[in-house]
Image (spheres, grey):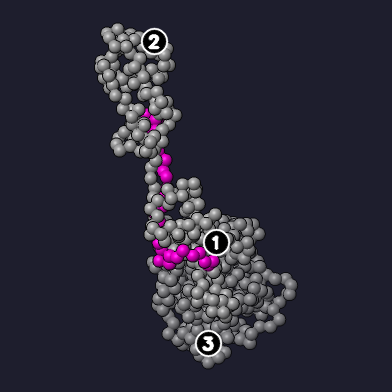
Amino acid sequence: MSEELKLDLLKRLDACGAVEDAAAAYPGVAVEAILGALKSLESQEKVAYETLATEVWSVEAEGEDQLAHGSYEAQIFAAVPPGDEGISIDELKARFGAAKASLGQGRGFKNKWIKKTGANVVRLVDAIVDETRADLETIKATGTHPAKDVLKALKGRGLIKAAKVLSYAVRKGPRFSTELKKQATDLTAAMLHSGAWKTAEFKKFNFDALGISPAGGHLHPLMKVREEFRQVFFEVGFVEMPTNSFVESAFWNFDALFVPQKHPSRKLQDTFYVRDPPAATSLPAFWQDVKRVHESGGYGSIGHRCEWDVDEAQCLVLRTHTTPVSARMLYQLAQGPYRPAKYFSIDRVYRNEAVDNTHLAEFHQVEGAIADKNMSLGSLIDFLGVFFEKMGITNLRFKPTFNPYTEPSMEIFSWHEESGKWLEIGNSGMFRPEMLRPMGLPEDVKVAGFGLSLERPTMIKYGIDNIRKLFGHSVAVSMIEASPACRLDKKMGQEVFQAADEC
Ligand code: PHE
């Protein structure tokens, strides 16, 4: 049917140049079928069409009654005999029913056809013209009335109603022809081979189609935001560090970073220690330099002036941050001839923390390190400005803080418009010579580092209020499926780091 309709439409267009009212041209055909045929032909550019919407009026049941027997006011007038006596109102009620009698009398009074005298109604004129009935006749015959106010008034009286009727004015399209060719949906190898692609008609892509959502393979929101961070790092020339050292020696996690062996963060309450295997099998050759710098200092430092125990350094921990990943890379860098380096990583870290709405014992850190002879705190501030701008964060402030491995150290704050507060978005600083020099890095090579959480911006971007709904055993698979495959807020905006001050 639809093929026949399409062909017929094309034939008519060929013969007449245009079809002004397609619904009128196909009286027995549902308007939806006509539209379907037109859409299909339009996608092939064979036709172009315009939608015509007209208001068609029809007479309601009460209107039909008045059309058949005269308007109520005319019926009442006819029932009132000429002369001064007239007819009693009760009589009219009895004859026509209370509602009809009252409506008819009301309009009769208004038209000055009749008037009330005592309990009776008498005529004021000898003859009347029943305009209501005439108007209803016009509407019934033509579907409309030349006077808009008549339509409005009759609609107000509940005698008529309007309906929208659609039709289409059709013209030839740029690729008009009377033939219907099957359209190819794909360019195939066979078509290229045979040359059929030269004459084939291709079905147009429908970019508005929603598509079928895939049944599997949804990326977790954390992985999507991780990818956004990765792309920003790549844009500014960073190299990704290997992060597979989830179990790390206390040496790399703490000692190589000049964290004193008595530091509170090394306690069981903060760090997960690994029982089996009991200890790291080997330490890098510079462990003795680390021991020396902890115990008695060097490179301008007086050290911690406490005994440094190699057994303590050999304990295994679940890494509490990704700075040991940077430390390993910097050590590697120190083994070769000098070259500047920019490193980043995004991966899991573990802390022995009480789990609540914003804290987990396991989360992801975004880590960066820049090694260069000219690196300074000023250039770190400059870099962080560029880095965060790429995330859509332009208003930064820095506050001095303390880290065992950086000096000076700065917390990074950004202005959050919505809450009217400066929020902490990360931690940073210049790695200490006590960390870098034992590794073998030359004195004039300075290294800046910074770190932030991945969970916080992800929760805010995806509107997740509880970290346990984002990560861990109580995550609903539906959350992962329902999270948009791509967000269009390319600039991540300050709200990304809304709750980062709780890091
Ligand atoms: N390791 C720090 C943290 O866990 C972040 C940091 C990295 C700070 C590098 C300074 C330099 O919060």
Which numbered tag is attached to residue 389? none
Q: Disc 1 marks which amino acid?
A: Gly
Q: Disc 2 marks which amino acid?
A: Glu
Q: How many marks?
A: 3
SS at badge 2? helix
C-alpha span from label 2 to label 3: 117 Å
In depth, the one of 151 and 196 nearer the eye is: 196
- Range drawn in magenta: 155-183
Of labels 1 and 3, earlier in sequence is 1
Instruction: List the residue tagged with mark 1.
Output: 211
Q: Is residue 166 magenta?
A: yes
Q: Is residue 52 magenta?
A: no
SS at badge 3? loop
In this rendering, would 213 be left or right of 57? Answer: right
The residue shown at (35%, 34%) is 138
Of labels 2 and 3, earlier in sequence is 2
Q: Nearer the viewer, mark 2 or mark 3?
A: 2
Q: Disc 3 marks which amino acid?
A: Leu
Instruction: List the residue tagged with mark 3.
Output: 441
Which numbered tag is attached to residue 91? 2
